[in-house]
Amino acid sequence: MLSELQKEAAKAIVNIFETGKARGDYARVTLLVGDSGHLTYGRAQTTLGSGNLHLLIKSYCDAPGAAYARACKPYLPRLADIDLRLDNDQAFRNLLKEAGADPVMRDTQDSFFDRVYWKPAAASAATLGLAEALSVAVVYDSVVHGSWIALRDRTVAKAGHPSKAGERVWVSAYVRERRSWLTAHPNTLLRKTAYRMEAFEALIAAKNWSLALPMMVRGVRIDEAVLGRRPPVAVSAIDAATRNLRLTDPFMTGNDVRALEAALVKEGYAINCDGVFDEGLEKALKSFQQDYGLVADGIAGPATRIMLGI
């Protein structure tokens, strides 16, 4: 049975194949001319053409706290219908990129890719009697990339069942068979993905069947530190209650206005401190902004607040 570290290492290999990063790229949106999958998205690059992009976005929309659920939901019927016009829908592609920064989307992708790709791959490997970490990684890659069953059966026909051929001999034969299939494929785009098998051949040559760390895959280092590193969460630490103070009708009032008045008085501007943002306060604020090289718009926004120390 694989350890958690071995599982993550196997997933990292495929992440590198798909996005060039060991941890994957949750916001990655790709469209390659000639790709039968059409628009692809996320850490393991699930596709519009397979229908799996619909399942991923549906799972995200159903998740509590999904920041972009309301924006994504109108696209669900088109995703379900595999509307290929979405390939070039720039608004949708931008939405996917933005949603990739949402921690809820990242958790959804992790759960989704495990359910749709990893668990079936691990089960299929177990059925064949493949137990070594590198063997399972090869199966997982083929499940993600496609045509696992066809190439599995072709390898069994030529090399026999793994129980008779031996696990390492069979997996090596499978990798050679898949590489040959890819390099001769009528889809010239698929031919360019033979590097996946070349990477596995390098690991086989190194006899790294346990996926011992650290290891290099296509020039990317995989180690424990990388596997344990979650993508940074981009969230603002600005107090949501902070408002930009400006002249409005009716006038703004409150303690934040009083704080602005007190700061301006401290800087030497003569104003009536009554907690009301009126024309007199706007005039004093513009003078302060002009004196300190700020945009003199009379709005107490982030830059002005920092200069005033409030």
Image (cartoon, rainbow, N blue to C red):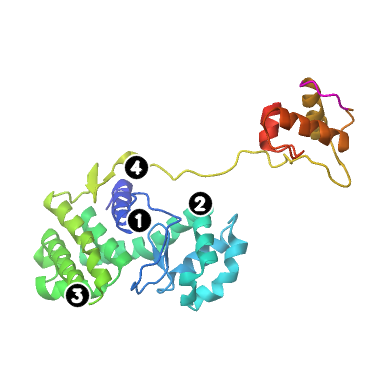
Label 3 amino acid?
Answer: Asp
Under mark 4, the amino acid is: Val
Residue at x 89% of width, y 46% of height: 250
Location of residue 235 with respect to 94 vertically, above or below: above
Quarter of the image with the C terminus is top right
Distance between the Cα atoms at labels 2 and 1? 16 Å
Q: Is residue 269 magenta?
A: yes
Q: Which residue is mark 2?
A: 101
- Which residue is under mark 3? 153
The reply to whether residue 278 is in sight is no
Callout 2: SS: loop
**Does residue 278 appear to the left or right of 14 in the view shown?**
right
Crowdedness near tag 3: few (<14), some (14–19) or many (≥20) residues, C-alpha within 10 Å: some
Expressed as whole percent of the image width and height from the top left, the position of residue 201 reads 15, 57
Given the image, on which type of amino acid does mark 1 rest? Thr
* Pointer 1 local density, CA inside 10 Å: few below 14, some 14–19, many at least 20: many
Indicate the quadrant where residue 300 lies.
top right
